[in-house]
Image: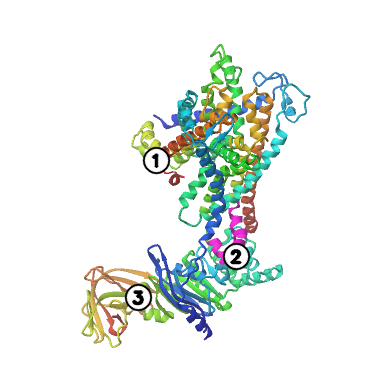
Amino acid sequence: MSMMAVAEETEMEPVVEKKSPGKALWLLAPGVIWMSLFLVLPMLMMVYVSFWTQTTFTIEPTLTLKSWITFFTSDTYLGALWTTVRIWLIVLVATVLVGYPAALFVGLFVKNKALQTVLLVLCVIPFWTSFLIRVLAWRPMLGKEGAINMILMNLGITDAPIEVLLFSELSVIIGMTQIYCVFMVGPIAFMLGRIDTSIIEAAQDLGAGFWRIFRTIILPLSMPGVVVGAIFVSVMVLGEFATSAALSGRKVNLLGNIIVTQVGSLKWAFAAVAGVVLTILMGAVVAALLRVVDLRKEL
Amino acid sequence: MNASGIKTGLGAYTALFLVFLYGPLVVLAILSFQTGPEGGPQFPIIEWSTYWYKHLFGLTPPSRIAPLPIEQALVRSLGLAVMTMIVSTVLGVTAAQAFRRKFRGSGVVFYLIVLGMMVPGVLVGLGMALVANTLGIDRHWWSTAFVLHVVYTFPFAFLVMLAIFNRFDPSMEEASWSLGVTPARTFRKVTFPLIFPGVLSAMLFAFTLSYDEFSRTLFASGRDLTLPLAIYGTFSVEVHPNVFAFGVLTTLFSFALLGTYAALMMLSVRRAKRVAIQEEA
Amino acid sequence: MSTVLQLKSITKTYGDMRALSGIDLALPGDAYISLLGPSGSGKTTLLRVIAGFEQPDGGAILFDGKRIDTVAPHKRGIGFVFQNFALFPHLSVAQNIAYGLENRDVDPVTDRRVVDARVRDIISLVGLSGLEGRAVTQISGGQRQRVALARTLVTEPRMVLLDEPLGALDANLRARMRAELRAIRERCGVTFLHVTGSEAEALAMGDTVLVLESGRIAQSADSDTVYNRPASPAVARFLNCYNLFQGRIEAGAFVGGAGRFALGASAPTRAATPAYAIRYDRVSVRPRDAAIGEDEIRIEANFVASEYSGAAVNSFFALDDGRVFEVESHLSHAAPETYAEQGRYALVWKREDALVYA
């Protein structure tokens, strides 16, 4: 009887208290705050400071376009912008050309799952070693008395060492291609591994040659992998400065190198302008690549 | 066109590709055994020796080649990597936990987090230096550089945990609640043990990435060098085989880390198996 | 019988979909209650709302007279057995069962010996002796089911919700577990609310059978009543043992596509739409020229096929409008008759056996 009384009493009262939707908020808050304070704020600060007035050793928060004008009228800065775009395009193409055949072999031709895993792990292992050491390792390879010249001369292919191998744009391209092609191989091999081989066998039964199968089946199906790889490679190459610092002997100046030297000489506003230009460049590249493929869907 | 010919060709190419990937590191390792202090960073090897390894640890008589400032740098790098590992793993787990329920604005938050691994170190590093300058804060490896390391590694931990939670059966937690166990204790007793392999992966990612990080550190760490910065410093000067010797050691360290991780994973898998087999008998 | 759980106009919507539209029910203590509903009828949602995994949009839930709809799941004291069992894969059988005792918020058992003793008791109750140390990945489906049950029962909840607990088992095991679940429940004296999509399971197991139909309780009665007097045409259709006709009542007869059926003496059951239902096993098949009694109804149909299912044979006939009419003959009554393919037969039943809804 008393239970019924309680029931009557509570009957019409609507349920108001929802199961805390704020719980997710509390879990997210630390990460979101961290990213806002230490990622978004610094980036905004960079944009803001690019409009500050640069004096010899300090900057003042008086807004001006002077740094921007200096950037776009200076051959050094515009040259660096052009070099960045050029190196990025060359390295991008080089990583695809160098990485695709290896990915094709690992992702499609190796049927044994264990061997496939071993090969992929072999490709990824260098990623776990120090980036700077990998860059530096090219010096004894490419130098005038380096391994490559030594081999070439011992084989009698050349008489004198090839000097252009090190401390040139070529050495930067070689170094970057080696370091970043792993990021191209992975996604492409992943996409190729998802191809149902019975399609290819069916095409073979119909008498299609390898190139025809490659052009009509394999290449289109692997394109999302190429684009994902291109996003990885682009983001990393555009933000580069260490490889060119180590291997070009100051001959190749990327926007990243400009930022480093400007900061070194306390030209914060100029560095900020270069940073904003680099951000815009990267945003445009990534946005263009994302139009080709939906990253969230593919991964 | 025959397919086996193409397969052989691609196989040979892949072998060459692996030589391309590993060749420089192998050459570097060989040259690290060059004699010293007169032997330079090139072939031929005048005499095999471990001089440069001793040089690294200050066990050789003083010479014109200055020792690498690695002792303090190693301590800082390890400290920074451990701090970064802990904080980014905690952030990664909590953020991924929040993403298990659908909520409005999840797309924005997802991209905000992933942005951390996309934005180049030079840009965040520069931005952080500007913020620190404006606020009049000193830059240190344990403050400004540390927070940027987390910005970089947190997204990796987050993505790893997101993948783990995608495969996690939530009815396991509901079962625990229905047995009268609080959500907090459920997380500790049920959820965490089951996602632990993922947590281990996230920790490995965070530690390695932080230990190796230099572009953010370069701008945000102030005067004290971390290990990568010590190596970066040698870029502009003549390189001696001592850097190569250091490279070999740090590579071995990375492999040891990877090995430890693999052993831990194997152990947890085998333990589960052993319980099963033991009972089967 | 005291009421242990009471639901008052519980509603729940997902986006535009109304999963529960005003559920009212009262469940007695110490009883086996089966909740029958077709897939999509909201039965799992209802169970999850009672357990607290989902929040209702409106209404009230009273458990032991106390309102619990805003109480967190772990404070409700209601056990839950999942269809996929949801055992903890990192714990052994015994650890799974001991988990609730050791870790619960209220009154945890810290004494190792007490835990061991209670685990041992429940393990023998559900028949798992000898498997204590096994990994839960290394036991059969039926054994996992028992672990799931033991894990819940050892915490002594007043009520256990079972979400299609036999759904993941094969047919053989399912039949055996039915009897065992009932026996285990009787020994523990708790209330079981067993959700199932199988009418046979619901009727066989429940002291009380609740039928859920598009988010509402369509009927709540004992098995016999549900089976013999389904409360609505929808319940009858879902029981899967009634031939149903649509139509209208006209001058003491039901008029539908299949003809004009004279009504018996009993008053029609109230329903939203008029319908006429005759149970499969109340129909007899006769040659076309056989005479019929005064109280009988006769229609003609073409034989299509027969299906043996152990103790009975189900024959399918095509009516003239193309609809299928099913007849169930129990083999204990007579030897199975064989009908000519496409042969025309008379299907006959007594007026009083039909259920009429108006």
Confirm or deny contact between disc 2 and disc 1 (CB under 8 A).
no
Compared to residue C132, the image places residue B75 above or below, namely above
Q: Which residue corresponds to mark 1?
A: A291
Residue B227 visible to the viewer: yes
- Residue at the image position 50 percent from the left and 32 percent from the top: A274
Report the chain holding disc 1.
A
Callout 2: chain: B
Question: Which residue is most to the front?
Answer: A62
Label 3, on which residue?
C236
Residue displayed at 44% across by 36% down: A285
Give, as a three-letter code, the residue at label 1. Answer: Arg
Residue A163 vertical placement versus C92 (above, below):
above
Secondary structure beneath dot 3 equals: helix
Which residue shows up at 73% across the image and 26% down it? Answer: B50
Pinpoint residue C284: horizontal percent, then vertical percent: 29, 78
Range covered by the magenta-colored residues: B171-196
Q: Quadrant of the C terminus of chain C?
A: bottom left
- Which colour style is shown? rainbow
The secondary element bearing badge 2 is classed as loop
Q: Circle 1 sits in a helix, a strand or a loop, which is it? A: helix
Residue at mark 2: B182
Q: Nearer the viewer, residue A141 or C52?
A: C52
Q: Residues within 10 Å of mark 3 (few under 14, many from 20)?
A: many
